[in-house]
Amino acid sequence: MAERGLPWAAGRDRREYLVRTLRGRDAIRERLRPQREHSAYALAQLEPGLFERTRWFEAEGPGGRGLVTHSRGGLGEATFVTGDPEAAAAILSIEPGPARSYLTCKPEHLEAVRNVYHLSNSQPMLRMAVTAATFQPHEVAPAVRLLGIDIRRINQLYGSDGNPTYYEAEHIDGGVYRGVVVSGRLVAIAGTHAVSPQERVAVVGNVFTHPRQRGQGYATAATSAATETLLETCETVVLTVDPNNGPAVAAYRRLGYRDSGEMVEATAMRRDSAALLALPRRLLARMRGRERGGAIVSVRL
């Protein structure tokens, strides 16, 4: 395989990647925009106030380019992996990220991430995307705007299936949340994982209906209202859904969401060995790459 102009040669049993830290929004945006729908959450992290809590790494080598983002938000740590799997493996070998993180990647990255993380609750997901041109509103029931002052009844709703949740008011006020109220009670909700008016992208999530109110279209109505609001400032709105959840997939398609590829979401626990080896590997890689402005990492074949 060609080395794409990189200034080093690969041996028979290994290939070398130059890993750099990315610090400029413009450079990061340039890498992410060609796969805008897949990278919507990462793009949203370029928003002022969020960008300062992220770390971005890029690797380039014979297999191509890979990018890894470690971010820290109100709901915890998150890791996003994209690009060439071998290049991503080179990054993760020296920058494995936090001890516990919520991981998003594509199926082809699983081998690379499993070298670094124990994965639990791993779930293949379908990415879907909607634009103003494809959106079809669904108004089976009126939806209301939800704010931080509604946090008590929001947590009560999310916990109605026996799994308590602990959202805070700032999570609601920092996103876009819409709910359906029946007989004075909040019975369905749809919100966001990330919103970036600057990058004009948003990620819909936290869609939930009270167990006794399901099958009546309330979640679809809440999602429709949230999507309509988001499309006022965003060009692209995305969500992920279990592809085996036929009713949910069908509901999103009725709203104008279109299939946009496979993804994997999982809770990632960093392996002890990855944490122990990362520092010496990073120091050695930086010594090898100091004249190239980065770190040179060898990936075994």
Image: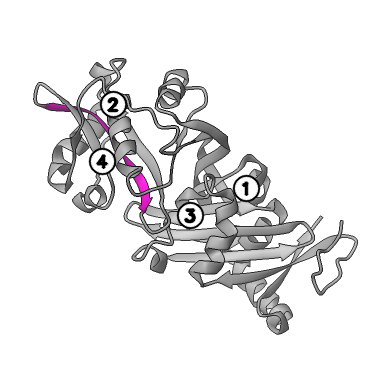
Q: Earlier in the sequence, mark 3 or mark 4?
A: 3
Question: Outermost residue, right direction?
Answer: 12
For mark 4, what is the residue?
A: 177
x, y percent for residue 2: 86, 60
Query: Tell me, what colour scheme is on the image?
Result: one colour
For mark 3, what is the residue?
A: 42
Label 1 crowd (10 A; few <14 / some 14-19 / many >=20): some
Label 3 crowd (10 A; few <14 / some 14-19 / many >=20): many
Distance in Å between CA atoms under marks 2 and 3: 27 Å
Is residue 210 in view from this perspective?
yes
Distance in Å between CA atoms under marks 3 and 1: 21 Å
Distance in Å between CA atoms under marks 2 and 1: 38 Å
Callout 2–callout 1 Cβ contact below 8 Å: no
For mark 1, what is the residue?
A: 114
Task: Indicate left or right for 117 with 285 as reference.
Answer: left
Q: Earlier in the sequence, mark 2 or mark 1?
A: 1
Image quarter of residue 86: bottom right
Q: Under tag 1, what secondary structure?
A: helix
Image quarter of residue 136: top left
For mark 2, what is the residue?
A: 221
Q: Is residue 187 magenta?
A: yes
x, y percent for residue 232: 32, 45
- Give the quarter of the figure containing the N terminus: bottom right
Q: Earlier in the sequence, mark 3 or mark 1?
A: 3
Q: Is residue 265 above or below residue 257?
A: below
The amino acid beneath tag 1 is Arg
Q: Earlier in the sequence, mark 4 or mark 2?
A: 4
The amino acid beneath tag 3 is Ala
